[in-house]
Amino acid sequence: MEKQDYVLLDGKKTAADIRAEIALEVERMVETGKKRPHLAAILVGHDGGSETYVNNKVKACEACGFRSTLLRFETNITEAELLDEVRKLNEDKEVDGFIVQLPLPHHISEQKVIEAIDYRKDVDGFHPINVGRLAAGLPCFVSATPKGILELLRRYDVRTRSKHVVILGRSNIVGKPLASLMMQRSYGDATVTVCHSHTVNLAEECRRADILVAAIGQPEFVKADMVREGATVVDVGTTRVPDPSRPRGFRLSGDVMFDEVAPKCSYITPVPGGVGPMTIAMLMQNTLAAARNEYYT
Amino acid sequence: MEKQDYVLLDGKKTAADIRAEIALEVERMVETGKKRPHLAAILVGHDGGSETYVNNKVKACEACGFRSTLLRFETNITEAELLDEVRKLNEDKEVDGFIVQLPLPHHISEQKVIEAIDYRKDVDGFHPINVGRLAAGLPCFVSATPKGILELLRRYDVRTRSKHVVILGRSNIVGKPLASLMMQRSYGDATVTVCHSHTVNLAEECRRADILVAAIGQPEFVKADMVREGATVVDVGTTRVPDPSRPRGFRLSGDVMFDEVAPKCSYITPVPGGVGPMTIAMLMQNTLAAARNEYYT
């Protein structure tokens, strides 16, 4: 039998714990006369992945005792119309926070939409004010995936301070904000290396990681020879790979070749059930924080 | 005689070139009926370093053909009064961009002042909107020191793409924004590692650098054994070290022990005359960009 003494970083279970904690907190709020936190989501079109994500977010709201509102629009909505919907949510005093599910149709500028969101309701943490405040170490909405990774490590007592964290990928929603979080004294306090498509000796860089985070969206890119014995591996990838044997016709693949990498690890996240559920749990935390005006008044 | 085949990254000369280029551009603008770019600076108190910096900025404005305005206040100015001065500059249509020289007296929140500045006039690039837009790879005012480092390397044809850049220090004005710039495809496109006081094996991390940037403010911290043969070393440190033999009673010390490190380098910046003058030149570039509404309208 193969050696298998790694610990699975169970995002599914951890996210359920967090939802339960939030639900308790919400009931306490309601008992003291406060209103339920209220998350709104805008969904444009019928992309399969987006439908699933938004569905899971609505379900998570229910589990947390939040009120939720889903606003659906067809792909022929104009940019001006969508910006107008954003403005309405900005002004709606009943809504604590809201998200616009990405991606948007090509005729709509995602950046323009993101910047139109009131940063005090920007529970995705994508608005430049939140990104900038994060980079400067100021209180703000931290984008959910990087925040979820840190929280998952924290709950399993995986220390980040003084560790060498190697991040594969420099996207605006994972790689860059995670680097920003990981290097800060008040969050990761780690030595951080960011690698990407133009990195040379990528395998060597990866082997130097105490904690390796793969966020490039390339199925099974990380092989065993790229991982140091005893490392912690966090897999952010969730690519839909066609698989006729599955009822839905696809399976979710991570960026890590799990079967060969896991035996070398101290800790590793599964896909699915790792970072994904944590991301949604952090969106719930951000919504709770919005309802309580934790970062902004 | 000691081996000395390194190239000095001459920030003083490069900054002079840039000022001359800007001056030419300004004369062209004025000839076509446009007004001269106008930089304003707020200086509170009489800190020696700050006086020098602001003086050099005013001189640089003259060399560039800019109009400049220096607003001086005593250290007993209240936060509310200072915020009011910021508001006036925000509204002054004659002012294209302005800076508030840091540090400020302890009774004034620097962050509050920075956030009060209209981000469209924030030529220091410190406002969260500019920091956030930089992190997201969007057009914005890039803070002057990191921008100056990239420009200096560029003018000496020191490639950054696919190089391993190691940054010592994670400050909000150098380390973090430089990391952000260096990792982005449209700027440095480098593999970036950020090290700091909690990094273990610091010397080993530094030895892996193709380009080592020291920005920790600890005189002569970087020794020869921390530098790889053939590396490029950029020294951001400018600490005033007491020196009775000098007329002013101090000398400026960099973070790098220049005499022992330089012989191992391909390229190295001197202190003074390296990153410092480049920082001011980039402030001039940002002011020109502000006058031309290059990033914001």
Image: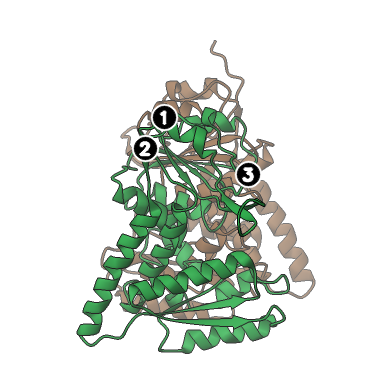
Chain colours: A green, B brown
Closer to the eye: label 3 or 2:
2
Q: Does the image show residue B49?
A: no
Across and down, in percent, residue B87 comes to: 45, 80
Q: Does the image show residue B165?
A: yes
Rendered view: A84 above or below A52: below
In the displayed structure image, the side of residue A27 where residue A249 appears, left or right: right
Q: In this view of the protein, which residue sits in the foreground, B272 or B292?
A: B292
User: For mark 3, does the 10 Å Cα neighbourhood hold few (<14), some (14 to 19), or many (20 or more) residues?
Assistant: many
In the displayed structure image, the side of residue B249 where residue B121 appears, left or right: right
Same subunit, labels 1 and 3: the answer reads: yes
- Residue identified by numbered label 3: B189
Q: Picture quarter containing residue B169?
A: top left
- Evaluate if marks 3 and 2 touch, with contact meaning CB atoms under 8 Å apart: no
Give the residue type at disc 3: Asp
Across and down, in percent, residue A152 comes to: 36, 52
Question: Mark 1 vs mark 3: which is more N-terminal?
Answer: 3
Q: In this view of the protein, which residue sits in the foreground, A157 or A174?
A: A157
Residue at figure coordinates x 68%, y 47% from the top left: B17
- Residue identified by numbered label 2: A163
Give the residue type at disc 2: Lys
- Residue identified by numbered label 1: B222
Given the image, what chain letter belongs to the residue carrying mark 2?
A: A
